[in-house]
Image: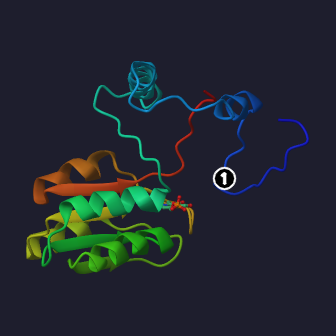
Amino acid sequence: MKNKQFLMIPGPTPVPESVLLAMAKHPIGHRSSEFSEILKEVYENLKYVFQTKNDVFMFASSGTGAMDAALSNLVNEGDNVLSLVLGNFGNRWAKIASGYGANVDKIEVEAGQVINPEDVRKKLAEKDYKIVTLTHSETSTGAKTTLKQFAKSLLKQTQFLLLTELQVFVPCL
Ligand SMILES: Cc1ncc(COP(=O)(O)O)c(C=O)c1O
């Protein structure tokens, strides 16, 4: 990692040489048993990394690609979506949902602020929202929502809570 350019922003992250070298290897067949074994191991290890027993999904896309995949699979035209907007990336959720024909309402706060869970509870009591979107750690403003209790009560009032967290630290593989 010596003599590398370090960008002091949320990404792109510096990649260790060992990982770069592994990626320079010739590809193997993506339907081969060799690939299946590697994939199985990676999925298992990701559970350890994220400290979960639940399924972990990998997306060969940017963060926005994963947001788009989540919404395109869940939104039907005319669905009500509530977007909790702390900044640029919260707004991105809202834009993508609108693109799929959702009726999007927003709760928006000024840069650096977080949304009061009570405001969300009230809004959800007014209308049937199928989906709530939220950027956990809004990198465009630096504001982070404390989710622990909030998420549980949210899920009682809506079907899906779509959440992005792009600041997760993954130890070097
Ligand atoms: C909080 C957050 N959400 C979404 C994105 C979008 O990710 P990408 O640029 O990989 O599409 C970013 C990217 O910096 C981000 O920081």
Q: Residue at x 84, y 50 (%)?
A: 5
Q: Nearer the viewer, residue 58 or 114?
A: 58
Q: Amino acid at mark 1?
A: Pro
Q: Position of residue 20 (x, y in %)?
A: 71, 35
Q: If the image is split into quadrants, where does the C terminus sit?
A: top right
Q: If the image is split into quadrants, where does the N terminus sit?
A: top right
User: Can residue 131 be spotted in the picture?
Assistant: yes
**In the picture provided, is 173 more to the left or to the right than 105?**
right
Secondary structure at numbered mark 1: loop
Q: Position of residue 171 (x, y in %)?
A: 60, 30
Q: Nearer the viewer, residue 77 or 35?
A: 35
Numbered disc total: 1
Which residue is under mark 1?
A: 12
Q: Position of residue 164 (x, y in %)?
A: 41, 55
Q: Position of residue 42 (x, y in %)?
A: 45, 25
Q: Residue at x 35, y 35 (%)?
A: 56
